[in-house]
């Protein structure tokens, strides 16, 4: 009888050793709707760094492995992105702004997509953006991919 208790205790200890380390590395479980709210808030705060002219805060939303696509090819890594985007933070007024209109999160809660319009300084819709966000073990969302595309007028559209 004592041996059975010992074996049950040993099995429980072995299970705890197997389960606890994996659980500690995973991000906490969060409802899907809350994840969408988190990603929308992250994208909105990211966009606010441009309006606030805060390049340092801008850099805080970029994952170390980020790839941002631009006219001269992809920028790889947070340092390259921050360096290239510094030029957008030099003037007193923001040269453009953006806002998320679409936010989708994987059921796993690890990756998300944001998409929406980009506006010039006068508020004209000039482009659209698509960003992929990754949720880290600490629960923070960071941009891993970003790509913009110009808006084109529809051929034959009525004025």
Image (cartoon, rainbow, N blue to C red):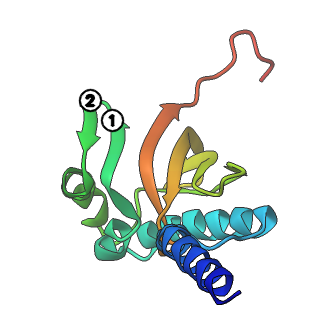
Quadrant, the C terminus: top right
Q: How many marks?
A: 2
Residue closest to the eye, 16 or 38: 16
Q: Residue at x 77, y 16 (%)?
A: 157
Q: Quadrant of residue 79?
A: bottom left
Rendered location of residue 78, percent (x, y): 26, 56
Crowd band around label 2 with a 10 angstrom C-alpha radius: few (<14), some (14–19), many (20+)? few
Cα–Cα span, label 2 and label 1: 5 Å
Q: Residue at x 68, y 48 (%)?
A: 106
Rendered location of residue 144, percent (x, y): 42, 50
User: In the drawing, what numbered circle is on residue 73?
Assistant: 2
**In the image, farthest residue toward the top:** 156
Q: Residue at x 56, y 62 (%)?
A: 43
Callout 2–callout 1 Cβ contact below 8 Å: yes
Q: Residue at x 25, y 59 (%)?
A: 82
The secondary element bearing badge 2 is classed as strand
Quadrant, the N terminus: bottom right
Rendered location of residue 136, percent (x, y): 47, 65
**In the image, farthest residue toward the front:** 1
| 116 sits to left or right of 84 | right
- Above or below 114: residue 8: below
| 98 sits to left or right of 148 | right
Residue 40 in sight: yes
User: In the drawing, what numbered circle is on residue 108?
Assistant: none
Residue closest to the eye, 16 or 35: 16
Q: Quadrant of residue 91?
A: bottom left
| 13 sits to left or right of 83 | right
Residue closest to the eye, 48 or 135: 135
| 29 sits to left or right of 33 | left
Residue 139 in sight: no
Q: Which residue is mark 1?
A: 70
Crowd band around label 1 with a 10 angstrom C-alpha radius: few (<14), some (14–19), many (20+)? few
């Amino acid at each position: 009888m004592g041996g059975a208790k010992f074996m049950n205790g040993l099995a429980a200890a072995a299970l705890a050793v197997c389960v606890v380390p994996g659980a500690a590395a995973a991000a906490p479980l969060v409802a899907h709707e809350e994840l969408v709210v988190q990603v929308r808030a992250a994208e909105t705060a990211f966009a606010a760094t441009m309006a606030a002219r805060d390049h340092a805060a801008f850099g805080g939303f970029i994952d170390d492995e980020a790839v941002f696509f631009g006219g001269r090819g992809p920028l790889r890594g947070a340092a390259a992105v921050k360096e290239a985007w510094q030029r957008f933070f030099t003037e007193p007024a923001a040269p453009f702004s953006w806002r998320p209109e679409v936010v989708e999160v994987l059921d796993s809660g690890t990756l998300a997509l944001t998409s929406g319009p980009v506006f010039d300084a006068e508020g004209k819709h000039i482009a659209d953006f698509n960003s992929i966000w990754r949720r880290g073990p600490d629960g923070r969302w960071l941009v891993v991919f970003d790509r913009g595309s110009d808006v084109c007028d529809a051929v034959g559209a009525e004025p």
